[in-house]
Image (cartoon, rainbow, N blue to C red):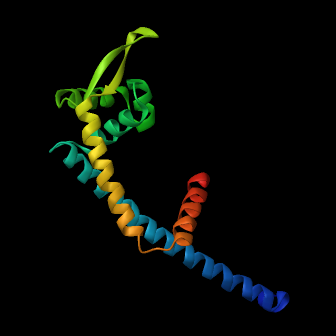
Amino acid sequence: MSIDHDAQVGPAAADDAAAGTAHDLAIGAVEEQFALLVNRIRNGIRDRAERISPGLQPAGYKLLSMVSRSGAIRAGALAEMLATDKSAVSRLIHQLETLGLVTRTPDPEDGRASLVVATAEGERRMESTRANDQAMLYQQLSSWDEAEVRRLAELLAKLNGAL
């Protein structure tokens, strides 16, 4: 004997199924927009790296950005933040040192270790890049009303908290 599930549970189940489908479609739309945003962010990081120094790889930009934001930091901590190995971070630090964007200083807490610090030139280039990016974001959101901007911030915070 076969069971007709829709007949047994009535119209409420059909509404739930339709709502589930609508919810799935909405999630799919978010996924599509998120993929576009991630792609734009990747391209933006590549462009920022080029603005910092022609030929600088995105990973070098990310490392310089982390050093600039956190101040003096150990290479091991940078490797953890970038989710990569210490040898890759060491190569990036060397590249940034060669460009005059970071320097290494002895770690006062551990004479065997060193701290990576952005140079004045590294800070200047990062600040210039950040200022350009911030101006672009302000320009893009200037036509939104305050409630929309606040709602976007709330939803992004909620998503970031869930990830």
Task: Report whether 148 appears left or right of 45.
Answer: right
In the rendering, at what x and y percent does residue 93 appear? 27, 28
Above-or-below relation of 119 to 45: above
The reply to whether residue 17 is visible in this rendering is: yes
Nearer the observer, 48 or 91 = 48
Residue at the extreme top: 111
The reply to whether residue 4 is visible in this rendering is: no
In the rendering, at what x and y percent does residue 137 appear? 37, 62
Q: Residue at x 36, y 26 (%)?
A: 86
Is the N terminus in the top left, top right, bottom left or bottom right quadrant?
bottom right
Snapshot quadrant of residue 75? top left
Nearer the observer, 126 or 157 = 126
In the rendering, at what x and y percent does residue 85 appear? 38, 30
Nearer the observer, 151 or 46 = 151
Q: Residue at x 21, y 31 (%)?
A: 95
Task: Report whether 158 appears left or right of 98.
Answer: right
In the rendering, at what x and y percent does residue 11 appear? 79, 92
Task: Report whether 59 appears left or right of 161.
Answer: left
Above-or-below relation of 162 to 59: below
Task: Report whether 10 appears left or right of 67.
Answer: right
